[in-house]
Image (cartoon, rainbow, N blue to C red):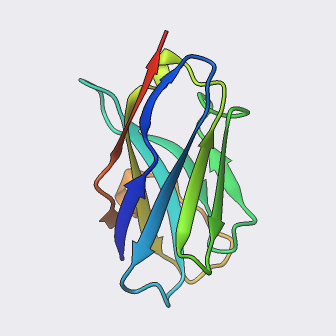
Amino acid sequence: VQLQASGGGLVQAGGSLRLSCTASGRTSSRYALGWFRQAPGKEREFVAAISWSGLRTYFADSVQGRFTISRDNAKNTVYLQMNSLKPEDTAIYYCAATPTYSTENYYYRRSEYPDWGQGTQVTVSS
């Protein structure tokens, strides 16, 4: 599938942003979704994942309790709600998709995702 992320921007510490990522192409097949981020000079890291059904989610320890992930399969869209943002959350955020036969599996390894969006910049000022 092709992925288009949006919703990034500049926000003060403690603020909120909601990222969206819309899929197109082979959306009739089941696919799990994830969000990753890459800060300058650092490796791309896992942020959050969601199963095809949307019932199972998984988060990196660094965002647990502050971020939520959800999806609307009718709109082929996944959302990342980011609250209580910190300067260390500053990064380019990427959405990713992987085909799956399971409605409940989620994935958190970069290598498990063949399809990636172009990224959206999130900057959190102190």
Please, which residue is most extreme toward the bottom here? 28
For the residue pair 50 and 117, the one nearer the viewer reads as 117
Please, which residue is most extreme toward the top here? 126
Q: Could you say where residue 22 lies in the image, as x and y percent from the top left?
A: 45, 67
Residue 121: name its quadrant: top left
Left or right side of 94 for 62: right
Left or right side of 11 for 14: right
Q: Could you say where residue 33 lies in the image, as x and y percent from the top left?
A: 52, 63
**What residue appears at the point 68 percent right and 55 percent down from the top-left corner?**
57
Left or right side of 27 for 83: right
**What residue appears at the point 57 percent right and 76 percent down from the top-left corner?**
75
Above or below, 113 relative to 89: below
> Which quarter of the figure is the N terminus placed in?
bottom left
Above or below, 118 relative to 38: below
For the residue pair 83 and 9, the one nearer the viewer reads as 9
**What residue appears at the point 57 percent right and 47 percent down from the top-left corner?**
48
Q: Could you say where residue 102 lies in the image, as x and y percent from the top left?
A: 62, 79
Residue 8: name its quadrant: top left
Label count reads: 0
Above or below, 99 relative to 56: below
Please, which residue is most extreme toward the left here? 41
